[in-house]
Amino acid sequence: MRNNKYIKVKCIEVKQPIGIFYIATIEWYDINNIARADIRRIEKGEGGKVETYLGMQRRLSDSRVKEISRYVRNIDATFPTGIILHINSYSRYDDGEDNVEEFRNVIFDKDKSEMQIRVDDDVATILDGQHRIEGLKKGLGEKGLKTKFQLNVSIFVDLDMDNQSMVFATVNKAQTKVNKSLVYDLFAFANTRSPQRTAHNIVRLLDENEKSPFNKMVKILGTADDPDRETITQATIAESIIKYISKRPMSDRDNLKRKKKLDRAIGIDNKRLFFRNLFIDEKDAVIAKNIINLFSAVKQKWPDHWSNTLLTKSAGVITFMRFLRPAYLSLANEIGDVVGTDQFYELLSDVEIDGNSFNKENYPPGSSGQSKLYKELIEYTGLDDRITL
């Protein structure tokens, strides 16, 4: 027996070249109830009509769903962009014994600006937004709880397959990713401390301080005004800093906005996240000083190759930021101290790498080149990169 119950939602009618569609506000769990069959199909990678028509395949990304499930618990979580649904006006069900039932899926009352949508798990097809729905389900729907989180939804009714596929292809193929450096730059406008804001401020300091080895060398918004000089993106450095501050930076940011105290790093975590307690104690300057001192030592070690080799590109910066942890832990008297440039330089004096070898041939772009350089740094300095108590 199919469900013949309906939810009522306020909506407005929109006319565009493709035809008429509707914009409504619907609770996430109501969307889940009318599109569960579609989500299950996407999760299994089973081809639906739209995907078959386009020759495409959609699958849910577990990592993306998990990331969204954490995000939706934040105090300032928001999804301002809409979910896109398609609904056929009628559904027909055949029980295999020549008994056919027909149900009306959607009723729009233009005078009341109200739509009724039948509640059944295969009423709606999700053209865009399946990860958000699953993330909300995982993050807010545990133990049967119905935590409210309204979503703005665009609803297409009775689109032919050609137009459904066009909408699907437009939102799933033509989307452009936001520049990561721009994202970090926007954290500067936040009123609350966060790992992201601290990382942004430190990167700005590295770029603007005349005594910094990275002075005027950072692509602050991911693009270079002077490509010959600006060789490293803001996001690359910021992400390398954050990994020493927090395992879950968005969660830390949310807790700080809620005026909650962060858990300090203790035991082995104090070695993994050796900048965390400095961040909690608002000693961002000490974090910045240690980074400046390491790279000042690198610049002194290879002065003729500092600005024109991989040392100041992603490969070199990521590698030496990785090297910072074992180097810092071996040189600092206590975690939280400032390690001087001369201390880092003395450690690097044992590294027998010719500056002329800092090229793509010896250290290929990507993780393989970074791993090779890191292993050589560890071998020459005799450091132990294992984290133990």
Image (cartoon, grey):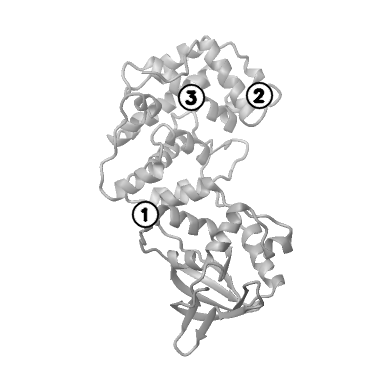
- Residue at 68% x, 72% y is 163
Ranked by sequence position, the earlier of labels 1 and 3 is: 1
Could one spot residue 94 in this view of the protein? yes
**Left or right: 306 with respect to 291?**
right
Give how far across and how far down residue 363 sits, in percent: 66, 24
Q: Nearer the viewer, residue 374 or 61?
A: 61
Disc 1 versus disc 2: nearer the observer:
1
Mark 1 against mark 3, which lies toward the viewer?
A: 1
Q: Is residue 305 visible?
A: no
Amino acid type, residue under disc 2 in the picture: Tyr
Determine whether label 3 and label 2 are within 8 Å by CB.
no
Q: Residues within 10 Å of mark 3 (few under 14, many from 20)?
A: many
Tell me the SS state at disc 1. Answer: helix
Given residues 58 and 380, the one toward you in this image is 58
Q: Quadrant of residue 112?
A: bottom left
Marking on residue 295 = 3
Q: Which residue lies under the disc numbered 2? A: 363
In space, the residues marked 1 and 3 are separated at their CA atoms by 50 Å
For the point 52% across and 15% down, which residue is it? 378
Q: Residue 143 — which label?
A: 1
Of tags 3 and 2, the one toward the viewer is 2
Quick one: label 2, few (<14), some, or many (20+) residues within 10 Å? Answer: some
Within-10-Å neighbours for mark 1: few <14, some 14–19, many 20+: few
For the residue marked with disc 3, what is the amino acid?
Phe
**Circle 2 SS class:** loop
Residue 1 in the image: above or below residue 383:
below
Tag 3's secondary structure? helix
User: Is 298 situated above or below 101?
Assistant: above
Q: Residue at position x 44%, y 23% from top?
A: 325
Gap between marks 1 and 2, in whole Å? 50 Å
Image marks 1 and 3: residues in contact by CB distance under 8 Å:
no
